[in-house]
Image (spheres, grey):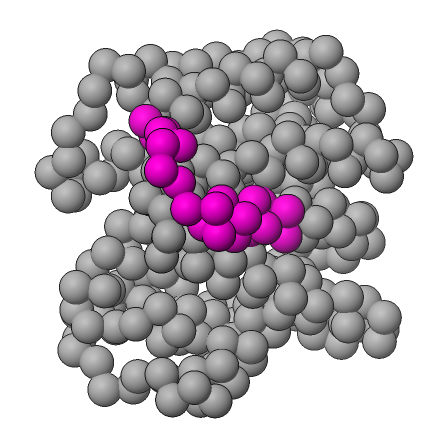
Amino acid sequence: MHLATNLLGTLQIILSAAGFATLAIFIKFAYAAGANLVTILAIRFIIAAFILVLILHYRGLSLRLNRKMTLALLAMGGLGYGSMSALFAGTLHYLPASLSAMLLYSYPAIVSLLSFFTGDERFTRIKGIALLICLIGLVLTLGVSFQSAAPIGVLLGLGSAIAYSIYIVIGNRLLKNTDALLVTGYICISAAIVFTLTGLGTGTLQLHLPYSAWFCILGIAVFPTIVGILFFFAGLKKVGPTNASIISTLEPVITVLLSILLLGEKVTQVQVGGGIMILCGIILLQLYPGAKR
């Protein structure tokens, strides 16, 4: 049963990574259609929140929670996920996309340390080896270079990784007594409020957009938001925060594959080798499922 649960959790995290991997592709097309970042984020979470509330109603799940849990989930979405998104967007202004992604994807190491120091998980040798393999594979896949990197960009990138790590560790604790669908719903609702108010307050919220932009934002709401967040929390509950973070390093590999298929980008042998290394790290965790705790 434990092996089956671990495998199901791994598949859910991989599906989440596939969902998140579409984000960069959809954003590229949305930018090309004339949408700005605040508009994309605000409408993304408004649509996702609306869809999730309908799903919750269909499943007979009430949004009512005790005050403490409600505030915690709203803070996770508005402060945790919201700050990570804003910091990462800021990183892209100063650094290349590959280096920005590499800094964000330092979060598996941070999650491992936080989970160990908070007593949520043991940090085993297998986890350490799998983490190292995946991080090396990530560097190869993204082709990262730190030459002439702007210090402010590096700080913003590390800040996004730290914010996301705290978000994951807190989410792991909250999920013990709360449905993953409900958690995802609250995160999207609070993020929608934050980014909508930001757009209204700064005058950057665009409502007159071409159909192509709305189509891209709808894709962002469904795949990297509902699918990405929902399946991440569902898998997180089964494999633990460290393993979930390590498996999520598959996301950049899927993004590269989508870039080849949809954007006509080329892939190098080094990138292929990096992708294989990440897969090896994930397989290692499956061979030793006892590494969860």
Query: Measuring 23% from the left and 86% from the top, which residue is drawn there?
Result: 208
Query: Measuring 77% from the left and 22% from the top, which residue is drawn there?
Result: 123
Is 281 or 186 nearer to us in this picture?
Answer: 281
Query: Measuring 38% from the left and 89% from the top, which residue is drawn there?
Result: 203
Q: Quadrant of the N terminus?
A: top right
Query: Measuring 66% from the left and 40% from the top, which residue is drawn there?
Result: 236
Percent of width and height locating residue 47: 43, 73
Quarter of the image where one finds residue 278? top left
Q: Is residue 131 above or below residue 64?
A: above
Is 9 or 254 nearer to us in this picture?
Answer: 254
The answer to whether residue 210 is left or right of residue 115 is left
Percent of width and height locating residue 92: 37, 53
Is any atom of residue 291 visible in this view?
yes
Please say whether residue 149 is one of the residues in the magenta stretch. Answer: yes
Q: Quadrant of the C terminus?
A: top right
The answer to whether residue 269 is left or right of residue 252 is left
Is 174 or 193 nearer to us in this picture?
Answer: 193
Please say whether residue 87 is one of the residues in the magenta stretch. Answer: no
Which is the main secondary structure of the residues drawn in magenta?
A: helix
Which residues lie in the magenta part?
142-163
